[in-house]
Amino acid sequence: MSEVPIALILARGENGVIGREGGLPWHLSGDLRFFKAQTLGKPIVMGRKTFQSIGRPLPGRPNLVVSRDPAFHPEGAEVFADLEAALARASDLAAEIPEGGPRREVMIIGGGQIYALTLARAQRIYLTEVHAAPEGDTSFPALDPSQWREILREDQASPGEGQPAFSFVILERSGAAPGP
Ligand SMILES: NC(=O)c1ccc[n+]([C@@H]2O[C@H](COP(=O)([O-])OP(=O)(O)OC[C@H]3O[C@@H](n4cnc5c(N)ncnc54)[C@H](OP(=O)(O)O)[C@@H]3O)[C@@H](O)[C@H]2O)c1
């Protein structure tokens, strides 16, 4: 098995909220474009609920889904009952990304449960900071600033009335990974 870095990609409100009633609490097409640009060509790993909320496999990327439901086998995605097996497969797929192609990394695309299980091992976080505090039922914890170094920040104006401004941020792990 080859080992490649794990990256999380997520959009989070200022209150930590990332999801509401199985979907996103906002619709930001600029963020969807950022997500596509950062994930194309890389293996994406997600929980069953996130896969169902997207509603289809995302093209141009191997889709790996974790679910303990043995009856769940959607078209266009590989399903794993075990997160470690999914990560190992994703790592092998990322290692096959050709020279000059996208960055060789495993992209964890959510949701809350899967982020919580992988954050401690992530080397990078592609974070869209949504400048709003919407209500929601799924959240992502505050990050320890001593563990993360910002390597990019791009502020984006509100795309239209009633829609929040947001910032694209890329964070690299700077401290040692926390213990178990
Ligand atoms: N803002 C963002 O960037 C962002 C990104 C992604 C998702 N979201 C939002 O997050 C919400 C969904 O997150 P969520 O936490 O409810 O669900 P989730 O993490 O997407 O999926 C949870 C499911 O994954 C499976 N699972 C979890 N741990 C597992 C393990 N160790 N081994 C095998 N399978 C495992 C289980 O599926 P089974 O029940 O089938 O066993 C579980 O029900 C939605 O609102 C979505 O829109 C937001």
Image (tube, helix red, strand yellow):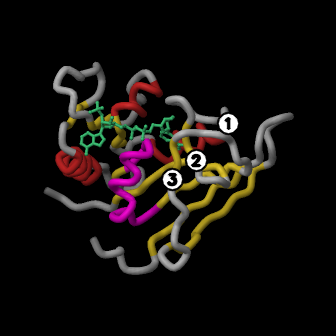
Badge 3 element: loop
Please identify the quadrant where the C terminus is shown.
Answer: bottom left
Residue wearing tag 3: 140
What label sits on residue 11 in the rendered view? 2
Q: Dots 1 and 3: beta carbons under 8 Å?
A: no
Residue at x-position 52% and y-position 79%: 146
Question: What amino acid does circle 3 point to?
Answer: Phe
Between 35 and 98, the one nearer to me in the picture: 35
Q: Dots 2 and 1: beta carbons under 8 Å?
A: yes
Between disc 2 and disc 1, whose residue precedes? 2
Badge 2 element: strand
Residue 10: x and y, percent? 52, 48
Marks 3 and 2, how far apart at CA: 9 Å
Image: 67 above or below 164? above
Image: 64 above or below 121? above
Question: What amino acid does circle 1 point to?
Answer: Leu
Between disc 3 and disc 2, whose residue precedes? 2
Residue 65 located left or right of residue 1: right
- Span shown in magenta: 107-124
